[in-house]
Amino acid sequence: MVVSRQQAIKTHDHIDFVFGKDVILRYNDPRRFGAVLWTTDPIAEHKLLKDLGPEPLLADFTGTHLHIRAKNRKVPVKSFIMDSHVVVGVGNIYANEALFMAGIHPLKHAGQITLAEYDTLAECIRTALANAIQQGGTTLRDFVNEAGKPGYFQQQLRVYGRTGLPCVQCRQPLQEVRLSNRSTVFCLSCQP
């Protein structure tokens, strides 16, 4: 977030980038998902970046990309789309929401999904992420955006965090399982 020199350093503030007399870009990372690295090598060749999948909001992320990468894979599709080597930026909440929008059961093997289903899923991932960005992110506990404000996407969540509540489409109770120690919420009726 952009702060002034007078703003006190808080817990989880890790680095200040100082611009001019009184403008600081402060890196705050309470969950420690990020990193700040310095390199003089080409960025695309850095060991932490070179094997990453495409950014889901760019043109090279397609259903075809997912379908090719999923060939013969027996991993659950939810784990597959959360793998940063397949696609970056699809976290747990957005994976739940995109799979619901696409009507795909999260435990279905990635290799069993058709190209048409992956085309739909790719579009649903883009939609979920774009909506979240437009709403300023998802605040479940302590997330705030660069302006220190909470995100409002949680008010649009259709499955995540709604275990046992009626499905917004069919009114059947939403189910939850743990997958890779993450909450996975889905509708048995809408996501067969």
Image (cartoon, rainbow, N blue to C red):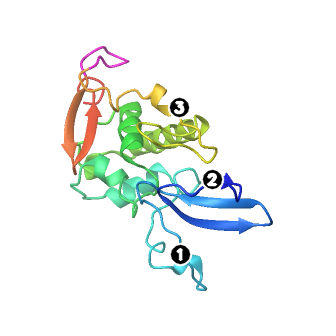
User: Magenta residues, as a range?
Assistant: 165-173
Quarter of the image with the C terminus in it: top left
Question: Mark 3 Cα within 10 Å, few/some/many (few <14, many 20+)?
Answer: some
Question: In x, y percent, where is residue 107?
Answer: 22, 43
Marks 1 and 2, the one that precedes in the sequence: 2
Residue placed under numbered mark 2 in the picture: 1
Left/right of residue 44 with respect to residue 4 in the rendered view: left
Query: Which kind of residue does numbered mark 1 sit on?
Result: Leu
Residue at coordinates 25% horizontally, 58% vertically from top-left?
Answer: 73
- Predominant SS of the magenta segment: loop
**Residue 162: in magenta span:** no
> What SS does tag 2 mark?
loop
Give the spatial CA distance, label 3 vs label 2. 18 Å
Question: In x, y percent, where is residue 141?
Answer: 41, 38
- Asked if the residue under mark 2 is in contact with the one under mark 1, i.e. CB atoms within 8 Å, the reply is no
Query: Which kind of residue does numbered mark 2 sit on?
Result: Met
Q: Please say if 112 is above or below 175.
A: below
Count numbered badges in the picture: 3
